[in-house]
Image: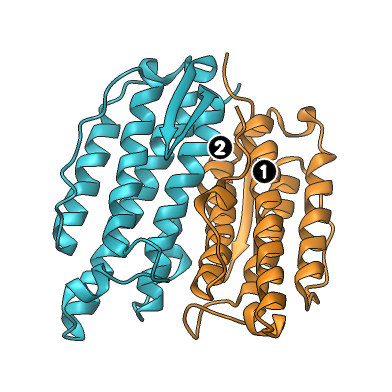
Chain colours: A orange, B cyan
């Protein structure tokens, strides 16, 4: 037995984005309880030239959607980047999760050796499908989910590792 | 073709811990250039009840070492948690990388269905090997590498996504 590309990609991405929905819900509840304008949390950055919370969520969604679409040789639906509240960002994540849920294993399996090129900034990166998943999609999505968590923790939202790891998958 | 457990675990962990060595080197160089006591950066937390930078590095090392040892039915070497400088933390990561480099694929492959129990706090979690890798080891290690990056960015160290993702693996 070995791992399939589908198993290594789709359920873990759905899992971490679902956990991020829960993290955002705690962020929204905290803003309400403390009478903080949600916009204050959504625009918080850990440093002036880092992205604010809203953008962290959008990018986590984009990489999950576009990355898996590339593995399946599809074009991911674009999203408008116009969310301005916790519920709107949660909805974006739920739409992303729906998108991921619609993949059949056959659309992703076998993509290990597929050649994938993408332009990041002024650079063109070329991967095989396996490296694209293991060295680009997964670390990138975990980066933005963790940074969203870190921003909310930094603002005082009571979150723990359990919120990030989610309900145990065994 | 499919992914092997070894391919999904060992090279990505080595890659991200190597990137973390580079991130720490930039942190140490920044402290020196700005005449900041390294201890100030190493003890920085994003919130009072979060772990400081030093502990983030130690945990990233521990989960990588102990997690992969569990997949291989081995006992990971313990480390003393006594690092007090950037070079000492880099050395811990390099020892961890050496440990990971010594696994043969045969020691990890086939662990997909192995039953793995671990105690986290007061709870016992039980996974199969595949879930342990995909839902515990990888997201956890990426969490602590990203949080180390976020702490240093928050302190003003000039880091970019490239430092986190590392040299492209294609």
Q: How many marks?
A: 2
B120 relative position to B39: left or right: right
Q: What's the chain of the residue with tag 1?
A: A
Looking at the image, is B20 positioned above or below residue A133?
below
- Residue A3 in the image, given as x and y percentages of width and height: 59, 24
Residue at the image position 57 percent from the left and 19 percent from the top = A2
Residue at the image position 28 percent from the left and 32 percent from the top = B101
- Residue B6 in the image, given as x and y percentages of width and height: 44, 26
C-alpha span from label 2 to label 1: 8 Å
Q: Quickly name the residue at label 2.
A: B135
B132 or A168: which is nearer to us? A168
Image quadrant where one finds the N terminus of chain B? top right
- Give the secondary structure at mark 2: helix
B38 relative position to A119: left or right: left
Badge 2 and badge 1 in a common chain: no
Q: Quickly name the residue at label 1.
A: A15
Q: Contact (CB < 8 A) between labels 2 and 1? A: yes
- Residue A90 in the image, given as x and y percentages of width and height: 77, 62
- Residue A124 picture quarter: bottom right
């Amino acid at each position: 037995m070995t791992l399939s590309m589908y198993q290594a990609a789709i359920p873990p991405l759905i899992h971490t984005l679902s956990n991020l929905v829960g993290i955002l819900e705690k962020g929204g509840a905290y803003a309400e309880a403390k009478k903080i304008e949600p916009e204050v949390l959504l625009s918080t950055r850990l440093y002036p030239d880092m992205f604010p919370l809203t953008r962290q969520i959008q990018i986590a969604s984009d990489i999950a959607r576009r990355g898996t679409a590339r593995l399946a040789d599809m074009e991911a639906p674009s999203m408008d980047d116009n969310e301005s509240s916790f519920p709107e960002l949660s909805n974006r994540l739920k739409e992303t999760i729906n998108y991921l849920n619609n993949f059949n294993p056959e659309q992703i399996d076998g993509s290990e050796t597929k050649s994938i090129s993408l332009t990041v900034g002024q650079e063109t990166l070329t991967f095989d499908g396996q490296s694209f998943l293991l060295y680009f999609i997964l670390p990138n999505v975990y980066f933005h989910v963790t940074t969203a968590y870190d921003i909310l923790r930094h603002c005082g939202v009571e979150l723990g590792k359990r919120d990030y790891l989610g309900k145990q998958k065994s």
